[in-house]
Every structure is written in C-alpha cells, then in structure tokens.
Amino acid sequence: MRIISQIRSLLFALLLLSLSAAAFAQIGISISFAPPELPVYEQPLCPGDGYLWTPGYWAYANDYDDYYWVPGTWVMAPEVGLLWTPAYWGWGGNGYVFYDGYWGQQVGFYGGVSYGFGYYGDGYQGGRWDNGHFFYNRSVNNVNVTEIHNVYNTTVIQNNNRVSFNGGTGGISARATPQQEVIAREKHIPAVAAQTQHAQDARTNPQQRASVNHGKPAVAATPKPGAFSDRAAAPAKAAGAPYNPPVKRAAVQPPAVAPAAQPENNAARPAQPAARPETNRPPTEQPNNRVETSRPTAAQPNARPEPNRNEPAQRPQTPPPSERSQPERASPPPEARTAPQQHAQPAARAPEEQKHPEEKPKKDEKPPQ
C-alpha cells in the first residue's frame, strides 16, 4: 500500500510540474509580423487596497487578422502573496509567439519588455507583499494616500524603450536568467475571469485594433477590468511609433483575376464589328469544306439561284455562335441580296464557288480513281 501511495504522489507531483510549465509557456499563436510599439498613457488611480497593476499589451485576433490593445488595469490578486507576470511576444524562429501572463509567488521572465509602472523589463518594482498586505511604491504608482496608507517611496530607474516584443528584427535581446527559469517551473495561476473578460471586451472593440488606431488606442488603461467607458479610463497620449499594418495578401489577388477576364471579353467584342467583311471570308472556307460533303449534289448547278443559296444561308447560322446574334440584323440583307442576285451577284458568287472546286486538286484526284 505504501508503494502505491508513493507512486500516486510522484504522479501528482509530475502533473503539477507539467501544469506549471504549461502555464508559463502557454503559446497561443505565431504571427509573421511584429506587434506595434507600446503606446504612451497614464495610469488610472488605484481603486482600493489589494488591487495590483497589470500592464496593457498587444494581443492578436485571427478572425480579423490584426493586433488589438488590451488596456492596462487594476486587478484584485486571486490570493494573498501572488504577483502578476505580464504576457509578452517573443520571436520563435518562424514568427512571433505569444506567451500568456500568470499569477505566481514571484515575477518571472516577460521578455525584457518595459511596460512601465513598475515593470521595466526585469522583475517588479511597483510594490511588495508584507504581512498579508500589499504595499505600493508611490514613485511608479498612482495611489491616493488618504485612502491607502500602506505605501512607500523608492526611486526606480525607468526604461523608456517602447518595443513590445523579444528577439527577431528590432526586438529586445533579453534572455531569462537561471532564477527566472526556476520561477517558470513553479506553480502558476492563469489570468482570472475578470482579466479574461477584459481582454475579450478589447477584442470586440474596433477602436482597439491597431489598423484603426495606428498604435494609439482610444482606451489605453482602465481603473478596473472592463471599465472601458469609465470616466477614469485613460486614452493613449501618443503611439510608441507610427504604425501601418502590412498589406494583406488577399487584397493583391483580386486585381490579378479581373484584368485577365477583361481582355477576353474585349477581344471578343472587336471581332464582331470590325471583322465583319473579313470574318465572313473565313467562314466561307468552312462552308467550302461542307460543300465538299455535298459534292454528290453538285450535279444541280442549274438550281443555283434558289436551293444552293438558301443552303449556305442556313448552314453558317448554326455553326458559328458569333453569327447567331447577326441573323436579326442580317435578315434584311438577304432580301436585298435576292434582288441583285439576278443581275451581278450570281455571276460574282458563281466564280467563287467554282474557284474552290476548280482549284485543280480534283484533277489530281481523278487519276487515283
């Protein structure tokens, strides 16, 4: 029984380690282009004792293929003694990978990104837990000392770098220390429900999208999660750097298809009006081939004025589709042709019809017969 209990305890310990590692390196998506730089904004007033600051960050939405800003906000810690490690973007070799934030006993590695307000790339200088109470550093936090008395004042060297990702071209070159790697393997708690809903509200707000605000979101920070319309919500003062979203590939494909269809239609249109005198000649070559099939009926040259003229008039109507629309316009010409056929046209057409049979390949064909 002792062996079974020991095995169960070992399995439980391995499960906790796997969950903590997964919480640290929970990878959502990989993007080919980097997020915008961090916007410049002010921190809203802390709403009360026990609230911890969670900095804003750029998240990504696959459904509309764009980054969006999740405002920084004050959040109640899920447990006494827990601190927040912010999310960050890091270069993964083929794209930028997103690492979720988490709650833990210590602040871990967050890519060296300087989010401000105590998060300047390494650890957290915005406050600390002491005897079950959180003490705020007034030098980096906006706290009302008349309501919150557990405060202290320690000067912090601020890093004003606005780059929002680690590694890759133009990214921060910071790497996790051995101590931060140990912290990564500790037990973590993911974002609480209020934080998750806060991020979802930012996702569904078009004004938070980078392609709309160009790196300067309308709501950069809120006093509490989800308080986007609160009077204390702070807009961004400026973008960290001018941002223009990359051109999407889908927008390049339609122009390549449209011109390909237009020349085909344009090529078919000029063939009808401009080539009427010339296109009528090649079709006469086709009926000649068909006349060869009717050579056994060539013994009826005396009936040329009516039967032979009516037959070629009916035959070109069916084969060429381009001439099917012309019979309506060409209906009066046959009437005009019937009158002159008695004067000069029969003589002009007769030699043309005779030229084809008299091309003298027939004489060459007679000897083999």
Image (cartoon, rainbow, N blue to C red):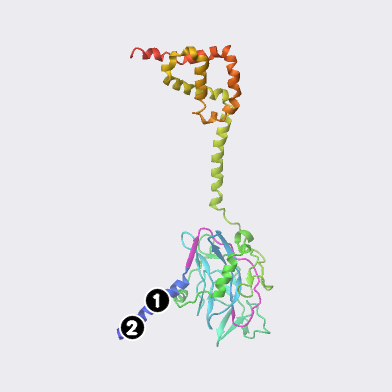
Q: Residue at x 59, y 28 (%)?
A: 328
Instruction: Out of 21 and 227, give the one closest to the viewer.
Output: 227
Q: Amino acid at mark 1?
A: Leu
Give whichever of 195, 246 is nearer the camera: 195
Please say whether residue 114 is one of the residues in the magenta stretch: no
**Looking at the picture, which amino acid does disc 2 mark?**
Gln
Residue 297 in picture, x, y percent from top left: 43, 17
Q: Check the picture and name the quadrant holding the C terminus.
A: top left
| Nearer to us in this view, 351 or 180 | 351
Q: On screen, 34 above or below 82? A: above
Q: Indicate left or right for 368 with 267 as reference.
A: left
Main SS, magenta residues: loop
Looking at the image, residue 286 sits to the left or right of residue 14; the answer is: right
Count of all numbered marks drawn on residues in the image:
2
Instruction: Please tell me whether residue 164 is drawn above or below residue 331 in the rendered image.
Output: below
Q: Looking at the figure, which quarter contains the N terminus?
A: bottom left
Label 2 sits on residue: 6
Q: Position of residue 282 (x, y in %)?
A: 50, 23
Residue 30 falls within the magenta-colored stretch:
yes
Q: Which quadrant would residue 135 be assigned to in this image?
A: bottom right
Q: Which residue is mark 1?
A: 15
Per the rendered image, the range of residues in magenta is 27-51
Label 2 neighbour load within 10 Å: few <14, some 14-19, many 20+ = few
Quadrant of residue 130 within the rendered picture: bottom right
Residue at the spot 49% in from the left edge and 61% down from the top edge: 30
Q: Earlier in the sequence, mark 2 or mark 1?
A: 2
> For numbered disc 1, what is the local secondary structure?
helix
Q: Secondary structure at mark 2?
A: helix
